Amino acid sequence: MGCSCCNFDDGDQVMRQMPESDASSQAVEVLSTCSGASAEGTSAKTLQATRVVSASHSATAAQRSIQTAAGADVELDGQKLPSSKLLLVVCGILALTGTALHIFAGESAAWAASLCSVGASALGMYLIYPEVAEAIKKRRVDINILMVVAVLGALALGDFSEAGVVVFLFCVGEWLEGFAIDRNRRSISALLELTPPQVQVIRQGRTLETSPEQIRVGEIIIVKPGSRIPLDGTITEGTSLIDEAAITGESVPVEKSAGSAVYSGALNVSDFLRIKTSATVEDSTLARIVELVRISQLQRSPYERFINRFARYYTPAVLVAAVLVALVVPSLGMMGLADLGGFDVWVYRALSMLVVACPCALVIATPVSIVCAMARAARSGIIVKGGAFLELAAKIDAIAFDKTGTLTQGAGLNRNELRDELRPEAAEVMDRLKAMHVRHTVMLTGDKQTVAAAIGHKAHVDQVHAELLPEQKLDWLRTLKQKYGHVAMVGDGINDAPALALADVGIAMGALGTDTAIEAADVALMEDSLAGLPRFFKLARKTVATIKINIAFALVIKVIVLALTVVGAASMWVAILADTGVLLAVLLFSMRLLRIRL
């Protein structure tokens, strides 16, 4: 067990998620894109090159923490380790038994108490051994090294019960972290499970049953009522209600008949359908969504990169400070300069410092919040390509909109003229965005001024710029960025690719089944509606607020307990309880994002 998020460099984490067969051939590409990351949107756009990452699992520390959280056996360097959940339970029983004997039985059971506590310490050290070995191999001081030093020091001082309890509570905190990671991993697994294991296909006039992987493009498949559609395609026979909530977030089923496009993962509600497939399992809409969600969870946000850089220097600094506290202060007494206590007192306080100073809660604060938010967004039909875009979206002051296909539903006949029809939700969406303190909205279109002005007025857009060439749209975007700072662009993802790329956050709407739309933008609204836009910005603001609260809370508690520890007002027990308590609070507070109403 171990804090997987603490143990990877930016490129290292991405590479460890790749299958071993692909890692060597694609290492240069992935590592170069990751190492060039900066704190703003440009870095996140560069990180989109990590689409090379596949779905395969690898035996890494991150995967071990996920597997152990689920109670699975783990293989390390060819050796199969027993379930960490069982070992953790045994460790807890021994630690608590040793402490109880020490408190209530006194000297009469001193040997039994010491034996239980030492056993608990040994089991706890065994549980964190893989991460300690990894840190030593890479010559890196991390929280696992701090914990080993603290436990060994407590044992050397004869504080057996404290050593056992400290390492047990540390492992509990790490298990809670792994549990949170596993819960979010299951959000991806739930998407994968939308593909049915068997499909009925018509071949040579006969109906056969086979796996979706065996279906070729252009074959006719049969989908029964109540079954998931396994592959993208076009209905050739039948009319039915199709529930696309798993993909678009839209809970109301839509009626589709012959000639209508349908997508993998959607639910056939009411009638039998014959569908001509247009994609294989690997190229289906559902597969693309799963891949994007998985890759986005590997990408680090600016907050996360900052905290990891901070922890890289903070952890060794804490170790040096603890050594100074343990050696310098009692040395002053030996020289007759001050009588503040002996070495045993200050070594104990230094070890307690190491425990409370563990940056685990700080390091986990951002990635857990980001992963929870992206999982929540995916359930609402919003695909975010990285945590950086959530952070940038929280800063957006101005939003530019394309007209045709974005604010309008496309061309329609009105009084013998070819006119666009305003989306019914457009005005309400604009009002909600302004209520969320978006300072300025603007429509950029190549349409005529009179038509654009009428649409803009009905849509409650602040400003309209019409009759624009593509390069003029880019000029206006640059002007908006100079005036307002952070600007988002909303378009259909096909004709607006340059503008979507230039904006701090490019948002493609109606991206369901459209490769270009998903590729062009930083955020994809799968539903063909603007309704997901305020939901996305609300989630982004809630996510950033959660991260800031997590970091502030963790820092304040650590500073207070650290000060109490140095002056001798807090024992090692208090230190580890505070550290584990802060970690648990951060995890629970972050996981609220999974259930937030949008």
Image (spheres, rainbow, N blue to C red):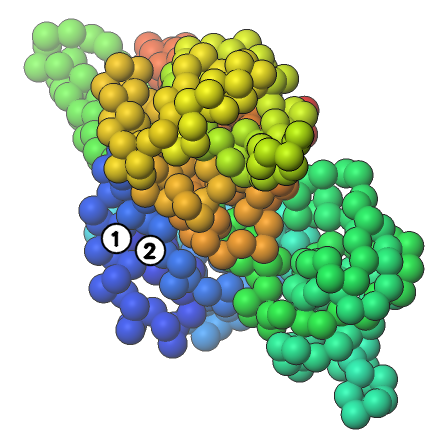
Q: Which residue is mark 1?
A: 33
Q: Which quadrant of the view contains residue 310? A: top left
Residue drawn 66% across the image and 43% down it: 248
Disc 1/disc 2 C-alpha distance (Å) = 7 Å
Q: Position of residue 478 (x, y in %)?
A: 25, 26
Residue drawn 80% across the image and 39% down it: 252
Residue drawn 60% across the image and 50% down it: 512
Q: Quadrant of the C terminus?
A: top right
Which of the pair 233/71 is nearer the observer?
233
Amino acid on which the number 1 mark rests in the picture: Thr
160 is higher (above) or lower (below) than 560: below
Q: Position of residue 165 (x, y in %)?
A: 53, 35
Which of the pair 460/326 is nearer the observer?
460
Among numbered discs 1 and 2, the one appearing first in the sequence: 1
Are the residues at dot 1 and dot 2 in contact (C-beta closer than 8 Å)?
yes
**Element type at marker 2?**
helix
Residue drawn 56% across the image and 69% down it: 282
**Element type at marker 1?**
helix
489 is higher (above) or lower (below) than 295: above
Which of the pair 367/401 is nearer the observer?
401
Instruction: Mark yes or no: residue 388 visible.
Output: no
Q: Which residue is mark 2?
A: 49
Q: Which quadrant of the view contains residue 77? A: bottom left
